[in-house]
Image: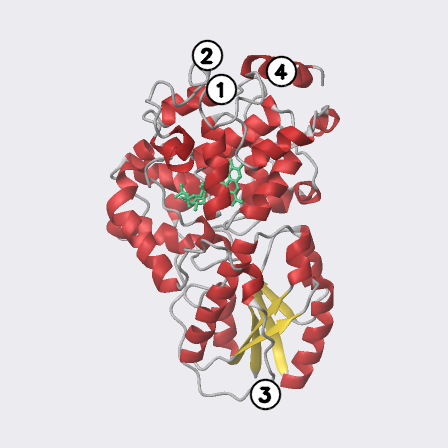
Amino acid sequence: MTQLMWFRQDLRIQDNSALWHATQAGQCIAFVALSPKQWQQHNDAPIKIDFYLRQLESLKDSLAQKNIPLIIKKIDEWQDIPHYLEQLTKELDIEHIYANAELGIHEQQRDQAVKNLKLFQDRTLFPVKSIRNKSNEPYKVFTPFKKACYERLHHDVPSCYPSIEKQAKIDCHIQSDALDQKDYQHKQAHWNVTEEHAHQLLNTFIQDDVKDYNKERDFPAYAGTSQLSAYLNIGILSARQCLNALFAPYDGQMHFKHDGEQTWLDELLWREFYQHVLYDFPKVSKHLPFKDETKKLKWENNEKDFKAWSEGQTGIPIVDAGMRQLLSTGWMHNRVRMICAMFLTKNLLVDWRKGEQFFMQHLIDGDLAANNGGWQWSASTGTDSVPYFRIFNPITQSERFDPKGDYIKKWIPELKQLDEKQIHDPYSKNANAHLDYPKPICDLKKTRQRALEAFKSL
Ligand SMILES: Cc1cc2nc3c(=O)[nH]c(=O)nc-3n(C[C@H](O)[C@H](O)[C@H](O)COP(=O)(O)OP(=O)(O)OC[C@H]3O[C@@H](n4cnc5c(N)ncnc54)[C@H](O)[C@@H]3O)c2cc1C
């Protein structure tokens, strides 16, 4: 019998649960729906869509080498997909549709309406609902969640699926639609696609960089992190593949020779944690804070402040450098994401949902679970988030994590001439009045106090 493999956020042929199972069950035809309206409703960034479409081309080639035809259909909104699939399965005499589960609410609703769908758990290392505390409830705090994952990993590291076989040629008369890629091209879309490329990045990171990851990961001027988030997000790489590459030097068993290896695993587990939170607490899909009491928080939501922040013109160099890195490349270093998010939500008292949306509209790795988790962590509204009284001072953060100002200089050429003492806070002590760079839009001490009071009053 013929099976239909429906690709979504899993654009790879290696280690793909649903694809592997589909090919075991018979001849396989692949399908992808392109849904521009839905992408817009979900605030997907043009740079992310461009990345997706380019990878889709590469996936089509990889599938063709296995004699699996790929049908690409433009179906603007997800609600119309179930009906289309019903017709398609009749026309092609399909036995089952195979897909990997997605964890957001809209995704689940879409899938529930699809007949004959077999779903596989592939986006996470461990199936959702499988990591539970002693009361059989989901974890709300990262550290015990991580411990539970460690126990599982000590026992058994989830292995990757074998490569799929080349199948006999199969006829498929369905014409694919084309989508105008030009609509999404980002001027600096330098992120290369293909599974091979993602594996090269992963292997180079594991060979050369992971051992010092714990020391270098917080310094945005170094390329000390893997930069694999965009690949993990649309599934060019799986989390299992990352784990297996990490433990490959130890015969695939969980073992660490360097602290950096363990720290990197912990970051993969943060990703895992937020995916499980998204599934277990659907309210985070509905623009609601995890902590109910923070619903009442009185945000200032000053439009001018938000505009300055979103354009990298706040007069706080580390914040502006981060925002300009995001606008220019579609990616921002994690330490700087936290600084920018905390500055917006605490110093400017702008609602975290506005920042979350803006990030989503610009990130190449924009992912509902991780983005929501990161924003709610920074805004102190989330599960296991930073306590509201621990407000980062962006100048101190800058001095600590960009001590020479190299990162700032890269993204703010206006400040290139300043030395490492002045660059973090150019106008302190009434210096540098001549600079073509904005004065700080707020007083950090006063706004810190304002945020503390707003949270205390809850
Ligand atoms: C406000 C805010 C928004 C964020 N939005 C996103 C987002 O939309 N998509 C996204 O993938 N990550 C997001 N993150 C998490 C993190 O910043 C990125 O995953 C990381 O910077 C990606 O760089 P990397 O691939 O070099 O990560 P590495 O440091 O090499 O880490 C390896 C992988 O672990 C995962 N990871 C690392 N840190 C985190 C984390 N704190 N939370 C969840 N997963 C993590 C990512 O998949 C990453 O690729 C956000 C963080 C904050 C504070």
Q: Which residue is mark 1?
A: 393
The mark nearer the N terminus, 2 or 3, is: 3
Mark 1 falls on what kind of element?
loop
- Locate the N terminus and report the quarter of the image it occupies: bottom right
Q: CA distance from mark 1 to mark 3?
A: 61 Å
Q: Which residue is mark 3?
A: 173
Q: Nearer the viewer, mark 1 or mark 3?
A: 1
Mark 2 crowdedness (10 Å alpha carbons): few <14, some 14-19, many ≥20: few
Asked if the residue at tag 4 contacts the one at tag 3, i.e. Cβ–Cβ closer than 8 Å, the answer is: no
The mark nearer the N terminus, 1 or 2, is: 1
Q: Name the residue furthest top.
A: 429
Asked if the residue at tag 2 contacts the one at tag 1, i.e. Cβ–Cβ closer than 8 Å, the answer is: no
Q: Nearer the viewer, mark 2 or mark 3?
A: 2
Mark 4 crowdedness (10 Å alpha carbons): few <14, some 14-19, many ≥20: some
Q: Which residue is mark 4?
A: 452
Q: Nearer the viewer, mark 4 or mark 1?
A: 1
Q: Which residue is mark 2?
A: 430
Residue plotted at (57% across, 38% down): 373
Q: CA distance from mark 2 to mark 3?
A: 72 Å
The mark nearer the N terminus, 1 or 3, is: 3
